[in-house]
Amino acid sequence: GWSNEGYGPFQGSMLTKGLLTYYYNGVHSNSHVELNRCTYANKADAPRLRIDDGSIQCRNKNEEDESCTDCRSVAFDDIVVADLSECNVPWTCQRNTVTLCESFTSVWFELRKEVEEAILSERPNRSLSYCSGEGGDYVPLLIPMQMKS
């Protein structure tokens, strides 16, 4: 962890996520505000998790076990930041079993389409399906430099 303070192990603990956690919990512990994880870092994950001693607790430690907020049931329009780490990432072309993950994936492909259209003045006639079938290969974004070769 950062400065041998033991931050982590969690996904991203050795990256920016871990550095910011250390900084605002350790270095400047009085200058942070905890944001709603379902709004600002929605992973579409289960509301409870099993910890090392085998017990189960709310992911949000500030909630009582009976009232754990399930981020999977948050209205899509209320989500500011989606974190795909618990979903099948779009470029694996795998279906998601969680409805919210499917919504995240659909928006990801819409945004990819916008980026591609902004980069290319003319693009091949393709549907929104950037996968060659269920579980098939992902069709990468072509940028002008790649198209010349």
Image (tube, helix red, strand yellow):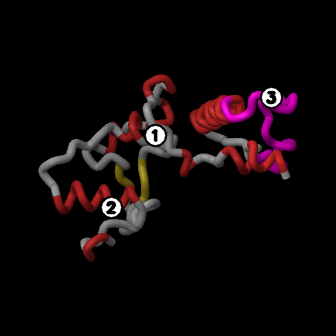
Disc on the earlier residue, 2 or 1 = 2
What amino acid type is highlighted by mark number 2? Leu
Q: Badge 1, how many Cα within 10 Å: few under 14, some, many 20+?
A: many
Of badges 3 and 1, the one in the foreground is: 3
- Is 132 above or below relative to 74? below
Q: Residues within 10 Å of mark 2 (few under 14, many from 20)?
A: some
Is 59 displayed left or right of 102 in the figure? left
Q: Looking at the picture, how far across and down is residue 126, in whole percent?
A: 85, 31
User: Residue drawn at (48%, 25%), measured in percent from left and top?
Assistant: 75
Q: Quadrant of residue 14?
A: bottom left
Give the mark nearest the N terminus, 3 or 1: 1
Do the residues under discs 2 and 1 have CB atoms within 8 angstroms?
Answer: no
Which residue is identified by label 3?
122
Q: Describe the element under mark 1 as helix, strand or loop.
A: loop
The residue carrying mark 1 is 42
Would you call the spot at circle 3 few (<14 residues within 10 Å), some (14-19), or many (20 or more)?
Answer: few
Q: Earlier in the sequence, mark 2 or mark 3?
A: 2
The foreground one among 16 and 102 is 16
Label number found at residue 19:
2
Residue at the (77%, 30%) spot, across then down: 128
Image quadrant in which the N terminus is located? bottom left
SS at circle 3: loop
What amino acid is at disc 1?
Asn
Please provide the residue range marked out in magenta: 118-140
